[in-house]
Amino acid sequence: MPLSHADIWSAIDALAQRLDTTPSGLARLAGLDPTSFNKSKRVSLAENDAGAARPRWPSTESLAKLLDATSLSFSDFAALTENRRIQTGVPLIGFAQAGNDGLFDDAGFPVGQGWDEIALPAGESGLYALEISGDSMLPLYRDGDRIIVDPHTQNLRRGDRVVVRTTDDEVMAKELVRQTALQVELRSINPSFANRVLERAQVAWIARIVWASQ
């Protein structure tokens, strides 16, 4: 489904809400004019053939500066545009409980009891959700946010946000820096927390974060 002007601006508004600020606050954070993302800038003064104001896209430079300032990947930003497309019945559990035995199979798919449900953008299948607890994933994910995880993950790339479960039943959300046949190197989303380097033998499974819901 193609992106619309409303999708892009809604994603910017959602990001502002997630970071507990305003569109003007986001613009300042990105080093832009404070009015760059204001509602008055979302239409052009030039009228179209029907005599109505034309919708205006934010510039690619503005978006690039915004993503850099918030450490948000383009795929994460694109996921914010999906908030309106929902279906039901996707498994949900608290992040703090995700390390418990009996909740995942060996491939990282949800099994067993204790799962709730969450609505999910339509068009996806086989995904599940984890609810964030605490501040270890600020500024991207706040306490109570829900991240959608794809256990079918293949071809992970540098910069992907991922959930990793170790053979010691530790579950963490990090940014992938590098993976080799021997190691997986991870960067903490919150810079106050340490980065991690895991031996491949320590990794039970690794899955990409594909969407986030507030």
Image (tube, helix red, strand yellow):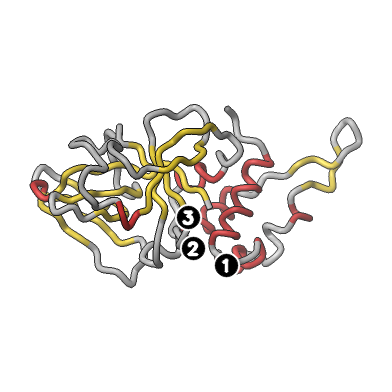
Between discs 2 and 3, the one toward the N terminus: 2
Q: Residue at x 37, y 30 (%)?
A: 126
Please say if the residues under marks 1 and 2 sit with CB atoms less than 8 Å apart.
Answer: yes
Classify mark 1: helix, strand or loop: loop
Mark 1 or 2: in front is 2
Residue under numbered circle 1: 31
Instruction: Please tell me whether residue 135 is drawn above or below residue 106 in the rendered image.
Output: below
Image x and y of residue 69, in percent = 49, 63
Between discs 1 and 2, the one toward the N terminus: 1
Q: Residue at x 51, y 33 (%)?
A: 88
Q: In the image, which disc is placed on residue 145?
A: 3
Disc 2 and disc 3: Cα gap in Å? Answer: 20 Å
Q: In the image, which disc is placed on residue 67?
A: none
Residue under numbered circle 2: 69
Instruction: Please tell me whether residue 89 is drawn above or below residue 133 in the rendered image.
Output: above
Give the amino acid at mark 3.
Asp
